[in-house]
Amino acid sequence: MATAPTPAVWRPTPAHLRAAAVGLPLAVAAIAVRRPDLLVLATPLLVITLWSVLDRPREAPRTSARLVSSTLREGEETSLHVDFGLPAGTRQSIATVHSSPWLHLRPRRGVLALAMADEPAATLDFEVRSTRWGEQHVAVVVAATSSWGGYRWGPVGLPDFGVTTLPLPAVFDAAAPAPHPSGLVGVNRSARLGDGSEFAGIRPFHTGDRLRRIHWPVSLRTRNIHVSETWADQDTQVVLVVDATSDVGVSEGIDGAASSLDTAARAAGAISEHYLHRGDRVGLRIFGTARRTRLSASTGKLHLRRVLDILATMSVQPPHLEDNTRIQFGLDAGALVIMLSPLFSVTALGHAVTLARQGLTVVVVDTLPAGLPEQTRDPYVALAWRIRLLQREADVRRVNGAGIPVVPWFGPGSLDQVLRDIGRRASAPRMARR
């Protein structure tokens, strides 16, 4: 809750001063020159001026504002309540709300005025809808007027509200299993035997086997103790690497076109939600911002919230030159690295190649919006875009040549084929040097 400081006294409005400045000379002139018509004109102005002075409030209003929820998802609404404690003589309370372009207000212009009839309190209600992920701010300015608009209190600004909008995860599902499972939970079939729920076979009893694993029908039939063997239930460490060095395209919020950073934030949220619901561990790395963000791999709904909170704080910073060979992402062997990038930055390409050379499985998700040259009417800008896209295609071919698949993002099934190919490649025989 934000409370207004107690400032300012009630001050006469320009209308009150004009009424006094016009009415008093007219009355004096009417008496001096004996003109009743001038007195008729001056009387209403003097009556209103005197009424405003006698009925003006003697205390400052008590004002406060409260936001029902400071954390939203894209497209969600919340309510902003502005409360007034009004002294006697207040006839109108006014509140104005200023916000970022991604917060839509109702009423549309963000101004509400409520006429009072000697009521001690009033509440003005606004509806706030967030249309894009990120950190937004809401500023509230309050004011009040007395009878006939003669005196005004304010405008007074209340402390700003911060609204954090989490990216709305896109619809995503992957039927293909993730390669290289390495943990002990999850739904992926392991490459080795161990404690699990999926039956693998029956074998003779060995020292160290648990008694609850004894398979009694086979043991009684063969007169030798046999135990049931299972595949270990294992998880996968999935690490999302988000390229925030540039934001390509036009962002129109959740109701319109998406830029490359919009697509990356929503896709990262969708992929995180998918793998965390499967029981896998998900980590997050963001580069290209003012400070490099790193979130260790973990599981659970609380971890999903951490991922979305970090994605909501992303902002594009000017790219800076880095030595890609010295970057340490701190990833475990066998991790599946999914990089989300529009592939316009040399730094992002260098990161992908560096991670692949470290023996990690890297998949690059292309977040570049479609139809960029057609979005401009300037033929020279469109030509420049086509040239840049040709250079980008050459960069993508070089990345593919390094063994890194590049797939476009189109929602469910975006990674199915590439994950199946990676799984086949991992299980295929390899040549070894002697």
Image: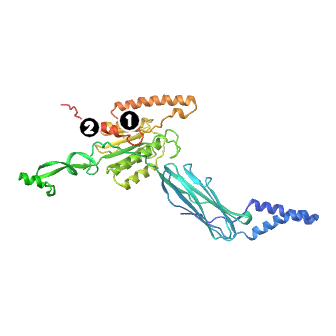
Q: Residue 51: horizontal and vertical position, in percent? A: 77, 69
Say if mark 2 contacts mark 1, CB within 8 Å: no
Q: Secondary structure at mark 2?
A: helix
Q: Residue 222: horizontal and vertical position, in percent? A: 6, 51
- Residue 288, relative to residue 158: is it above or below? above
- Measuring 74% from the left and 64% from the top, which residue is drawn there? 148
Disc on res. 406: 1
Left or right of 297 on screen, residue 429: left
Q: Is residue 63 visible?
A: yes
Q: Residue 200: horizontal and vertical position, in percent? A: 18, 47
**Viewer-closest of 136 and 236:** 236
Residue type at numbered disc 1:
Val
Q: Residue 399 occupies which quadrant of the picture?
A: top left
Q: Residue 129: horizontal and vertical position, in percent? A: 54, 53
> Badge 2: few (under 14), some or many (20 or more) residues near its Cα, within 10 Å?
few
Q: CA distance from mark 2 to mark 1?
A: 18 Å
**Viewer-closest of 389 and 225:** 225
Q: How is the image coloured?
A: rainbow
Left or right of 74 on screen, residue 399: left
Q: Is residue 355 visible?
A: no
Q: Which residue is mark 2?
A: 426
Q: Secondary structure at mark 1?
A: strand
> Badge 1: few (under 14), some or many (20 or more) residues near its Cα, within 10 Å?
many
- Which quadrant of the rendered structure holds the C terminus? top left
Residue type at numbered disc 2:
Ala
- Measuring 88% from the left and 65% from the top, which residue is drawn there? 39
Q: Which of marks 1 and 2 precedes in the sequence?
A: 1
